[in-house]
């Protein structure tokens, strides 16, 4: 049998079977991509820190927020766990802002949101009395954790590692190592497959816990000094603007679901350089303001609660660069 490849035979093959050849190549590429996607290590919610910027604010592109945020990982703002810092800027989402929130929340993306505690002008046009935090809480209360609960859980978490006294106790290194090894095994964390990497990870874990304690104490001092303060948010009926009431006539759901990081702009004069909204000045021009800028916390599905306190690490850096020098 003459199986010699000639130009004539090759030409016939390409003439009649070129679609099959392209289909085979395309199929190979698709299969290879699927194999690569399915076997590659996927980033987890705890490894990605995500900040939301509320649509009532000015886009973060117009401030200095990104100057520090883009280098936050390299500068050691977070612990070893966070390997990616992301921003969801709802100011650019238009009519898709809620769709964007729904999608991100259901996939476990989101740690906190900047939102001004001022009148919701859209609700006001409907004749309803809402602030922006109240409007957001009315829609996404299932994903928002109260700051009281968050701070109490942080104290309990730290006490568990610092001999029951997070303020003065010493880190229980044996427990830190034991829990770290158990978490790596349970999560099948490929970063620590080698024993040498595991040993390095244990040291990073000790550093993480000590850092949590240090930064949490600093944050509590900010609260005590009035640099930041907790804000009570009431769960309201979106149709009437009235709070939901119990059978006894009491407000059914309310709590400190927001943290005001600028209750007095004279103490946080630098915040409006990072995140702000626009207000109308006496001469009719627009000027930036961060007065009553708040932070709401998310507790989403699949989030590893061991790492939910990364938010404190980040917030402390925001406060530190925003605080008026005379207040420092």
Image (cartoon, helix red, strand yellow):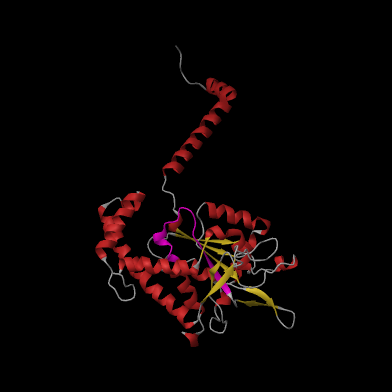
The image position of residue 316, as x and y in percent, is: 45, 73
Q: Relative to 188, is 10 on the left or the right?
A: right
The image position of residue 168, as x and y in percent, is: 31, 76
The image position of residue 75, as x and y in percent, is: 42, 69
Reply yes or no: does residue 106 show up in magenta: no
**With respect to residue 234, does 185 lie above or below?**
above
Camera-side residue: 244 or 264? 244
Give the residues in magenta. 293-310
**Residue positioned 25% across, 53% down in the render:** 195
**With respect to residue 298, does 225 lie above or below?**
below
Q: Relative to 93, is 172 on the left or the right?
A: left
- Examine the rendering and report whether any part of residue 71 can be seen: no
Q: Residue furthest bottom?
A: 326
Q: Relative to 234, is 169 on the left or the right?
A: left
**With respect to residue 235, does 226 lie above or below?**
below
Camera-side residue: 224 or 91? 224
The image position of residue 192, as x and y in percent, is: 31, 53
- Examine the rendering and report whether any part of residue 23 can be seen: yes
In the figure, residue 180 lies in which quadrant?
Answer: bottom left
Total of numbered circles in the picture? Answer: 0
**Residue positioned 65% across, 55% down in the render:** 96
Camera-side residue: 321 or 187? 187
Reply yes or no: does residue 298 show up in magenta: yes
Q: Relative to 25, is 304 on the left or the right?
A: left
Which quadrant of the rendered structure holds the N terminus?
Answer: top left
**Residue positioned 49% across, 33% down in the render:** 28
Q: Residue furthest front?
A: 248
């Amino acid at each position: 049998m003459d199986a010699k490849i000639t130009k004539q035979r090759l030409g016939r093959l390409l003439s009649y079977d070129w679609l099959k050849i392209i289909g085979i190549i395309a199929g190979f590429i698709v299969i290879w991509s699927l194999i690569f996607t399915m076997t590659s290590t996927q980033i987890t919610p705890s490894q990605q820190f995500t900040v939301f910027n509320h649509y009532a604010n000015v886009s973060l592109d117009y401030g200095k927020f990104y100057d520090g945020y883009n280098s936050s990982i390299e500068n050691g703002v977070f612990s070893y766990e966070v390997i990616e810092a992301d921003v969801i800027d709802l100011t650019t989402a238009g009519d898709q802002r809620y769709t964007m929130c729904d999608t991100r929340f259901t996939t476990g993306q989101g740690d906190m949101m900047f939102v001004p505690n001022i009148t919701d002008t859209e609700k006001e046009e409907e004749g309803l009395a809402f602030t922006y935090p109240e409007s957001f809480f009315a829609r996404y209360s299932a994903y928002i954790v109260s700051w009281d609960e968050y701070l109490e859980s942080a104290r309990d978490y730290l006490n568990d590692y610092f001999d029951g006294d997070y303020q003065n106790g010493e880190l229980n290194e044996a427990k830190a190592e034991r829990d770290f090894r158990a978490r790596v095994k349970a999560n099948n964390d490929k970063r620590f497959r080698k024993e040498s990497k595991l040993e390095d990870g244990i040291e990073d874990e000790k550093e993480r816990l000590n850092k949590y304690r240090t930064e949490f104490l600093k944050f509590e001092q900010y609260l005590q000094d009035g640099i930041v303060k907790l804000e009570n948010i009431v769960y309201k009926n979106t149709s009437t603007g009235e709070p939901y009431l119990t059978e006894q006539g009491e407000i059914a759901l309310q709590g400190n679901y927001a943290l005001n990081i600028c209750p007095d702009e004279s103490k946080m004069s630098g915040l409006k350089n990072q995140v702000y909204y626009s207000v109308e000045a006496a001469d009719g021009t627009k000027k930036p303001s961060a007065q009553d800028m708040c932070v709401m916390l998310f507790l989403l599905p699949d989030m590893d609660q061991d790492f939910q306190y990364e938010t404190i690490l980040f917030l402390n850096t925001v406060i530190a660069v925003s605080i008026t020098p005379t207040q420092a």
